[in-house]
Every structure is written in C-alpha cells, then in structure tokens.
Image: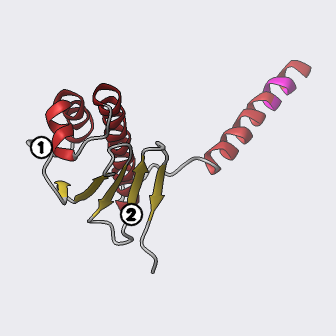
Amino acid sequence: MKKHRIIVSAVLLVLALGTLASQFAQDASTGPEKRSLERRASMLGLVRTIGTAEVGELDKYGSYASWQTLLAHEPKYLNAWLARFYYAKEANVHFGDMPEMLPGWNRRLNVHTDGQGDDLLLEDATDKNGYAALLDERAVIRECKRLQ
C-alpha cells in the first residue's frame, strides 16, 4: 500500500512538473521577427569577418585597406564567409562595390588617410528601423538603428 502511494505521488509530481515546464517553453516561430534576427546575426558575422581581414592587412602591409584591396588580398577568406552564411539563403551572389555590397546590405568603409584606422558601416537597407552595425580599428562592434 505504501509502495503504491509513493509511485502515484511520483507520477503526479512528474506530471505537475511537466505542465509547468511547458508553460515556460519558448515559441519557435519562423515569422518575420526570427528572419530579422537571423539577418542581423549574419550582418554582425560579416562585420567581424571584414574586421578580421582588416587586421590581417594591417599585420601584412602595415595599414588598413580599402574594400577593393580587401577583395583582392583576401578573396578566399571573404568568400568563405559568403559560402558558409549567405549562399544557403541566396545562390549565385557575389560581393559588390559601394554602396550595395550584397542585396539589401549597404556598406561604407572609410580608411583613415594615414592608413592606421578605418570605419565600417554595414546597413540593412530592407529594415524599416534602419538597423546597422559599426566597426572601427578598436574592434568594437556597435549596433544602431535610426532615430524616429
């Protein structure tokens, strides 16, 4: 009798905890918000990739480089990001020139006149809030959006 009460109590406890856990489960939606977050994560990854390529330029050549120079010196590295994170979404896409480097993504890369610094702005042209990521030679990435 005591054994049955323990088993019944354990089953009821498991069921109670199971219903509480489902109450706090995350919504795995695939709506526009999730796509927007994925796009932003891809943008930040690309900003990191460009920043890393710029550090390589500084190490090899003693100065930061323009976008055209980066594409010429680091094509395998930049195209590896493109193949891994972008081709899955859109096939047959290549990095472009200014301002639209990828469909819907505008880039501005300014190298300081002495070559010892740079400023990168990558903006999502499709985002109604004007989402953008910024990076400079201090390797600090900033996220920003347009003021309403």
Residue drawn at 29 percent across, 54 percent down: 110
Amino acid tagged 1:
His
Does the magenta portion include 10?
no
Q: Tag 1's secondary structure? A: loop
Question: Are there few (<14), some (14-19), or many (20+) residues within 10 Å of tag 1?
Answer: some
Q: Of 9 and 49, which appears nearest the observer?
A: 49
Picture colour scheme = secondary structure
Residue 67 in percent (x, y) is at 21, 46
Amino acid tagged 2:
Tyr
Q: Quadrant of residue 134?
A: bottom left
Is 73 situated above or below 93? Answer: above
- Residue 131 disc label: 2
Residue drawn at 79 percent across, 28 percent down: 10
Residue drawn at 55 percent across, 48 percent down: 26
Identify the residue at the far top of this view.
3
* Dominant SS in magenta: helix
Q: Quadrant of residue 15?
A: top right
Identify the residue at the far front of this view.
114
Q: Of 104 and 91, which appears nearest the observer?
A: 104
Q: Which residue is mark 1?
A: 94
Q: Quadrant of the C terminus?
A: bottom left
Residue 132 in percent (x, y) is at 38, 60
Residue 84 in percent (x, y) is at 25, 32
| Residue 87 visible here | no
Give the residues drawn in magenta, as a range: 5-9
Total labels drawn: 2
Which comes sooner in the sequence, label 1 or label 2? 1
Residue 130 in percent (x, y) is at 36, 69
Residue drawn at 38 percent across, 43 percent down: 116
Distance of label 1 from label 2 (alpha carbons): 22 Å
